[in-house]
Image (cartoon, rainbow, N blue to C red):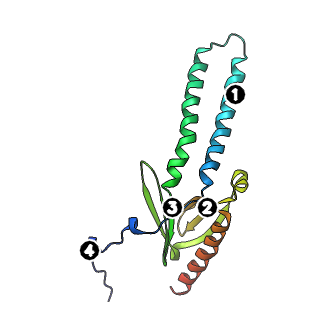
Amino acid sequence: MFENPEVALDELPDTDALDWERLHPLYARALRIVATIVLTIIAVAGTALTLIPNVPRAPFVALYSLLAIAAAVALIWPGISVQRQGYVVRDKDILFRKGVIWQSVTAIPFNRIQHVETSSNPIDRKFDLATLQLFTAGGSGGDLKIDGLGTDVAEKLRVFILDKAGAALEHA
């Protein structure tokens, strides 16, 4: 006979008590470099537009003011946001937390995972970083994406999770 007993709220596990693994320390620097590249492209394009004759200068003052604000945010924000991200690998699932203002914790049980992949862009490779992406049954895209892992850690996690997912399927 099927049973589904209630669980008291005080018996639920507390995620704050977990030992969260931090992302790679160079991840914030990589984010700053990407933001700097994007802002530089915008600044160069804006400067090129100022060279066109008879173009009013007032919009460019606003553009450069916004660029200065965006640059300040782009240099400060990664240091704040990366510190508040982390993951925990448990016996039956993996948890990932993120967010400064809007915080979230995502838990993916190993028995739901169908595919795991690692990837990296050129800047990630420069800093020896990788992204781990988990795909679950019924999902149209990656259900969990963890950026900013060290390449070796991402590969170890990928192999471990695939092993756990395979073992979970065999015992189902």
Question: Mark 4 and mark 3: span between their CA atoms?
Answer: 27 Å
Query: What residue would you read off at disc 1?
Result: 45
Q: Quadrant of the N terminus?
A: bottom left
How far across and down, in percent of the image, does residue 153 sit? 63, 68
Question: Mark 1 and mark 4: span between their CA atoms?
Answer: 59 Å
Which numbered circle lies on residue 149?
2
**Outermost residue to the front:** 25
**Outermost residue to the bottom:** 1
Report the residue at 26% width, 74% height from top: 8
Q: Earlier in the sequence, mark 1 or mark 4?
A: 4
Numbered disc 1: secondary structure: helix
How far across and down, in percent of the image, does residue 118 sit? 66, 64
Query: What residue would you read off at disc 4?
Result: 8
Specify few, some or many for label 1: CA neighbours under 10 Å numbering under 14, 14-19, or 20 or more: few
- Tags 3 and 2 touching, CB below 8 Å: no
Give the vertical position of 170 relative to 105 (above or below): below
Report the residue at 51% width, 54% height from top: 83
Q: Earlier in the sequence, mark 4 or mark 2?
A: 4
Q: In the figure, is residue 147 to the left or right of 9?
A: right
